[in-house]
Image: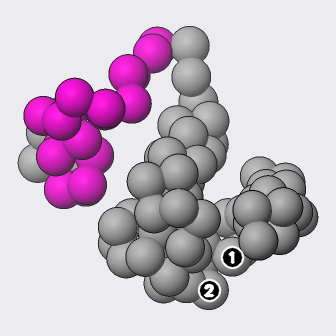
Amino acid sequence: MKDVPIQVRDATSGGSAIKADAELTVDEMEKRMVIQALEKTGGNRTKAAEKLGISRRTLHRKLNQYGLGKETQAGKEEQS
């Protein structure tokens, strides 16, 4: 467990932790973590990045990588 990032270790102690599944790839787990962070912060990307322990720029790249960039922006615009 020493090699597991603290965010992942801490997530296992919370009630809303992402359930580890042997069928999920690292990318799928990461995508779920990004989505969950955005949900918990009400779509605030700066706060989501802080929660994940990554820069806002890295979060932006991950959103694009997982095809979430436009989707999350559209959802934010609909809420306005």
Give the amino acid at mark 1: His
Decide which of 43, 58 is in the foreground and name it.
Answer: 43
Q: What element carries label 2?
A: helix
On screen, 15 above or below 63?
above
- The numbered mark at residue 35 is none
Residue 65 is left or right of residue 29, and the answer is right
Query: Where is residue 56 shown, x and y percent of the image?
Result: 55, 84
Decide which of 41, 17 is in the foreground and name it.
Answer: 41
Give the residue at x 12% y 34%.
13
Q: Residues within 10 Å of mark 1 (few under 14, many from 20)?
A: some
Which residue bears the numbered disc 1? Answer: 60
Q: Quadrant of residue 11?
A: top left
On screen, 8 above or below 70?
above
Give the amino acid at mark 2: Arg
Query: Where is residue 76 shown, x and y percent of the image?
Result: 75, 66
Q: What element carries label 1?
A: helix
On screen, 50 above or below 13?
below
Residue 11 lies within the magenta run: yes
Q: Residues within 10 Å of mark 2 (few under 14, many from 20)?
A: few
Q: Quadrant of residue 44?
A: bottom right
Q: What residue span does the magenta drawing correspond to?
A: 5-22
Magenta stretch secondary structure, dominant: loop
Query: Where is residue 61 shown, x and y percent of the image?
Result: 71, 73
